[in-house]
Image: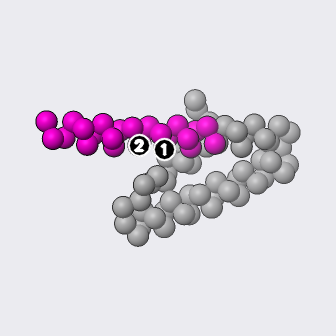
Amino acid sequence: MSVWQDWVIGLASLFPQNRQNSYATATVMEILRCLLFYALRFEFGGWRVWIDTLAILHSRIAFEEFRRANQQVISPL
């Protein structure tokens, strides 16, 4: 899926490890909030943009959690 939300979410660290990553993630989410507000308020079918964003965010977080869980299982071997 090549949509702008995927690119913007890719700039954030979904599980920040330090203060800088946390600040960058907060900034990216603020930008995303502004863009989604514009889409919902002014674009025809803006609700679809919101749904796409939720789906992309869910898939990225779920994949990262899956990757981390499998990495912990494989590491001791």
Q: Is residue 61 magenta?
A: yes
Scheme of colours in the image: one colour
Residue 58 part of the magenta segment:
yes
Crowd band around label 2 with a 10 angstrom C-alpha radius: few (<14), some (14–19), many (20+): some
Q: Quadrant of residue 51?
A: top right
Query: Magenta part mainly helix, strand or loop?
Result: helix
Q: Residue furthest left?
A: 77
What residue do we see at 39% from left, 38% from top? Answer: 66
**C-alpha separation, residue under disc 2 versus residue under disc 1:** 6 Å
Local packing at callout 1 (Cα closer than 10 Å; few below 14, some 14-19, many 20+) is: few
Q: In which quadrant will I find the C terminus?
A: top left
Residue 50 % position (x, y): 71, 43
Q: Name the foreground residue: 3 vs 16.
A: 16
Q: Are marks 2 and 1 in contact (CB under 8 Å)?
A: yes
Residue 60 seen in the figure? yes
Mark 1: which secondary structure? helix
Type of the residue with mark 2: Glu
**Mark number for residue 61?**
1
Picture layout, residue 27 above or below residue 9: below
Q: Quadrant of residue 31?
A: bottom right
Label 2: which secondary element: helix
**Image coords of residue 32 (percent x, y):** 64, 54
**Amino acid type, mark 1:** Ile
Residue at 83%, 43% (x, y): give it.
43
Q: In the rendering, at what x and y percent does residue 36 appear?
A: 72, 50
Which label number is shown at residue 74? none
Residue 6 visible:
no
Residue reaching furthest to the top: 1
Q: Which residues are magenta?
A: 54-77
Which residue is disc 2 drawn over? 65
Q: What residue appears at the point 46 percent right and 64 percent down from the top-left corner?
A: 22
